[in-house]
Image (cartoon, helix red, strand yellow):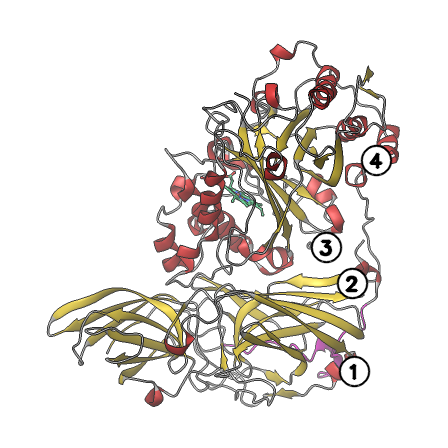
């Protein structure tokens, strides 16, 4: 039988009374009303919350960090549509799993994602695969709201699936296998309640973003500054608020003679958070001739980071490149990102 | 607002899930169904054990309707080495008593007895003309336990008391079935290594949704035949029994069987995804856009209108950012027809929402190819579709176990040799 149903929840986090003009209105301070007239772009959310660490552990080739915060509303994406996920009464925490390579400290978006099981006294309390997700303060992670049974010690089991995207350079042959690990998470409602909460009543809705949260325990997920990408930077363009940096590599350890590599690094403005899970098409012309016209596939490289790219059969060094967004990033969004990066712009470099 | 402290539902574990003589007695206390009797004339029964379709009821649209209650017994042969003629006779006699007692139908009893690679090891030979490989993981993101019993018995009926009584009778804890005396039982020959149960059909999933994997909001619709809320197994989306039948060699008339146990995690499915997203992921985004699926999908008639989904799942997935389960799976068709015959059913075994995915096919390779189409690894490559996110229903399921079996034709169902020729 399902014990979680028989254990009373530990009260509503953050429900409070806000005095209005002559009337009392009950609302949750953790989930204030959405900004009206949100721009179709990255914007400052209503608030930002602190994060507690539930723990971290190595799993095979990967490091896994588990952070938690108050339950969140967020948006899933299918195609160019978003679907808002509201907080349920049953939700106790928003759990965020970050997976990174301990050698390069690069946060890894993994197409098959992670699966999380929360157990207590040998019984499953909650279990689901969190969504690939982006947040202004947390960057790319896997997140969802989970139920707990109140204060106590939990075992959080995490399965990290194998990376299926192409891995280049020093990443070749790595992250081939799935791995599992678990973390002992001592949860206390009082610790959750003590996490910081900062409202942006003045600046909410303005175009901009809150800063990525730096934590000593886990790296932040950031793509390299465009100028520092390997190869020759072909340019940086903006579309649907996403930033597209295209670079051209004539030489790399993964290239044969007569080959070049086109890489497009797509990131959020302000924070350079990678935007994984997109469909991109690319064309390359050199000397008036089309030498490439195909999909750009997701790939991982220690210096390029997560990007979309393709090997192009040419030794020419000044290509004209076209990039078409066929489908936007299907990562779920925290507040402030849910109206951005949903269209399908085209660029030429 | 729901109060988590008070459950408005009572967890009523079904008699079939509990099993045993006490559950059977409790079940019969609620009323003894009038169950049609079977036949002494074994020749009047189909030569194929898996010939169920003609014996099943049909729904309003004319699709075969699966029996509602199921028991799977994973059996071990108690003798080392090759089976004796006496053991064979005992198994055959026990099974033919069931056929005499119950009509071969959903209103009576349907069953199959299959054999796994472990069973054939004793012959130091593979079954002649049919490949029954050891089960293995069929996706890079799964890690199933292999099932390795010697045999698998599948009992199915619309009546809970029938599957329970047949099971107890075979185990030797009950003397009669439908007023027929058991001439013999499986005792001393086949013992139960594991027992799994399930159900499929309108109303049952809603009634049994108080389990882990399904949120407390009772989201499973009353009309749903399966936990995920859609009708499945339309006539036009199934292989025919002919297609899945082994057509040559000593086991001609048999079939191969794959059984996996899949756990379902449906909180996101029901409480986060919209109806549109669910239809996109189960069928295809075009079906969602056009409102093709009403309710649980009865309106679809006898097929899922898959030809109205873009055929190139890779291209469609790249453009739409999501690809449907049926859309992906239809790529595994041969001559415009699926190669596997699905006879899957839901489960609450272990208090968890699950699905016993049982399918029949001429060759296990057909299943492997079908499952590969479902993995959608090619769709996820170079595309916004994730390997599980927006990739059909992969986000909501975990394959826990897999097993492969040979269903011999009826005349070879009792402890067959590897090469009956
Ligand atoms: C979680 C469990 C599953 C559910 C709820 C489910 C549900 C469905 C539904 C609703 C359809 C469309 C209706 C129909 O065609 O009958 C369908 C089609 C199909 N499914 Fe599944 N399915 C599940 C798992 C599987 C698995 C594990 C396989 C095999 C690898 C599979 C193979 C198929 C095939 C072959 C089709 C028909 C495709 C065609 O039309 O050619 N399903 N399924």
Q: Secondary structure at mark 4?
A: helix
Q: Earlier in the sequence, mark 3 or mark 4?
A: 4
Q: What whole-number distance in Å separates the C-alpha atoms at marks 4 and 2? A: 27 Å
- Nearest to the observer: residue B70 or residue B248: B248
Residue at the image position 44 percent from the left and 38 percent from the top: B305
Disc ID at residue A301: none
Question: Where is mark 1, residue-wise?
Answer: A190
Mark 3 and mark 1 on one chain: no
**Label 3 Cα crowd, 10 Å radius (few <14 / some 14-19 / many 20+):** many
- Nearest to the observer: residue B336 or residue A333: B336
Residue A132 position, x and y percent, is: 53, 69
Q: Quadrant of residue A67?
A: bottom right
Chain ID for label 4?
Answer: B
State whether residue B210 appears in this view.
no
Question: Where is mark 3, residue-wise?
Answer: B212
Question: Where is mark 4, residue-wise?
Answer: B20
Residue at the image position 28 percent from the left and 84 percent from the top: A231
Q: What whole-number distance in Å separates the C-alpha atoms at marks 3 and 4? A: 24 Å
**Position of the N terminus of chain B by quadrant:** bottom right
- Nearest to the observer: residue A108 or residue A245: A108
Measured along the vertical axis of the image, is residue B241 above or below residue B369?
Answer: above
Q: Secondary structure at mark 1?
A: helix
- Residue bounds of the magenta highlight: A9-37
Mark 3 and mark 2 on one chain: no
Question: Where is mark 2, residue-wise?
Answer: A122
């Amino acid at each position: 039988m399902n014990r979680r149903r028989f254990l009373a929840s530990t009260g509503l986090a953050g429900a409070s009374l806000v005095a209005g003009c002559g009337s009392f209105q009950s609302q949750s301070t953790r989930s204030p009303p959405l900004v009206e007239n949100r721009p179709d772009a990255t914007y400052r959310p209503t608030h930002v919350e602190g994060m507690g660490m539930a723990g971290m552990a190595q799993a095979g080739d990967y490091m896994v960090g588990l952070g938690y915060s108050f339950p969140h509303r967020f948006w899933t994406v299918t195609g160019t549509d978003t679907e808002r996920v509201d907080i349920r009464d049953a939700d106790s925490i928003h759990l965020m799993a970050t997976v990174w390579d301990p050698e390069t400290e690069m946060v890894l978006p993994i197409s098959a994602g992670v699966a999380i099981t929360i157990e207590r006294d040998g019984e499953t309390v909650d279990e689901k695969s969190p969504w690939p997700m982006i947040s202004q303060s947390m960057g790319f992670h896997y997140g969802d709201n989970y139920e707990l049974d109140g204060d106590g010690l939990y075992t959080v089991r995490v399965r990290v699936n194998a990376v299926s995207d192409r891995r280049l350079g020093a990443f070749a042959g790595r992250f081939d296998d799935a791995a599992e690990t678990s973390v002992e998470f001592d949860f206390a409602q009082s610790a959750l309640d003590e996490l910081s909460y900062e409202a942006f009543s003045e600046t909410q809705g303005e175009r901009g973003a809150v800063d990525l949260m730096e934590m000593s325990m886990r790296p932040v997920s950031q793509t390299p500054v465009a100028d520092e990408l390997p190869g020759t930077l072909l340019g940086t363009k903006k579309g649907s608020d996403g930033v597209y940096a295209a670079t051209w590599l004539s030489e790399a350890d993964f290239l044969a003679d007569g080959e070049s590599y086109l890489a497009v690094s797509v990131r959020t403005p302000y924070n350079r958070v990678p935007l994984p899970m997109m469909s991109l098409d690319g064309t390359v012309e050199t000397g008036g001739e089309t030498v490439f016209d195909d999909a750009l596939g997701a790939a991982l490289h220690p210096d390029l980071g997560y990007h979309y790219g393709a090997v192009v059969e040419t030794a020419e060094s000044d290509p004209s490149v076209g990039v078409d967004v066929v489908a936007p990033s299907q990562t779920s969004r925290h507040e402030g990102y849910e109206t951005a990066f949903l269209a399908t712009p085209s660029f030429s470099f | 607002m729901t109060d988590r402290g008070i459950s408005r539902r009572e967890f009523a574990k079904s008699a079939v899930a509990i099993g045993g003589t006490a559950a059977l007695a409790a079940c019969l206390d609620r009323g003894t169904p009038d169950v049609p009797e079977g036949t002494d004339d074994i020749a009047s029964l189909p030569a194929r054990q898996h010939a169920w379709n003609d014996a099943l009821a049909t729904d309003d649209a004319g699709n075969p309707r699966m029996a509602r209650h199921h028991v799977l017994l994973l059996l071990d042969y108690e003798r080392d080495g090759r089976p004796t003629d006496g053991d064979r006779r005992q198994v055959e006699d026990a099974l033919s008593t069931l056929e005499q007692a119950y009509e071969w139908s959903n209103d009576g009893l349907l069953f199959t007895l299959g054999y796994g690679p472990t069973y054939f090891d004793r012959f130091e030979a593979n079954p002649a003309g049919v490949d029954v490989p050891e089960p293995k993981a069929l996706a890079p993101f799964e890690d199933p336990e292999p099932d390795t019993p010697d045999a698998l018995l599948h009992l199915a009926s619309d009546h809970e008391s029938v599957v329970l009584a047949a099971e107890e009778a075979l185990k030797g804890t009950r003397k009669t079935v439908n007023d027929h005396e058991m001439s013999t039982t499986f005792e001393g020959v086949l013992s139960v290594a594991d027992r799994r149960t399930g159900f499929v059909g309108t109303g049952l999933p809603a009634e049994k949704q108080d389990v882990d994997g399904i949120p407390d909001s009772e989201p499973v619709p009353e009309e749903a035949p399966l936990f995920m809320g859609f009708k499945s197994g339309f006539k036009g989306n199934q292989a025919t029994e002919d297609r899945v039948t082994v057509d040559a060699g000593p086991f001609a008339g048999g079939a191969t069987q794959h059984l996996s146990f899949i756990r379902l995690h449906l909180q996101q499915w029901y409480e986060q995804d919209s109806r549109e997203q669910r239809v996109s992921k189960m069928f295809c985004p075009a079906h969602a856009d056009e409102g093709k699926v009403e309710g649980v999908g009865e309106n679809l008639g006898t097929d899922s209108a898959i030809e109205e989904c873009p055929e190139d799942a890779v291209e469609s997935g790249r453009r739409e950012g999501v690809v449907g389960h049926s859309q992906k799976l239809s790529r595994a068709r041969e001559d415009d027809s699926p190669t596997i015959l699905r006879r899957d059913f839901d489960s609450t075994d272990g208090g968890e929402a699950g699905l016993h995915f049982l399918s029949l096919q001429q060759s296990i390779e057909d299943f492997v190819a079908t499952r590969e189409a479902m993995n959608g690894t090619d769709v996820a490559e170079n595309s916004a579709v994730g390997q599980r996110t927006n990739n059909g229903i992969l986000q909501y399921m975990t394959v826990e176990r897999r097993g492969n079996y040979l269903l011999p034709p009826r005349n070879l169902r009792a402890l067959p040799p590897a090469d009956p020729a």
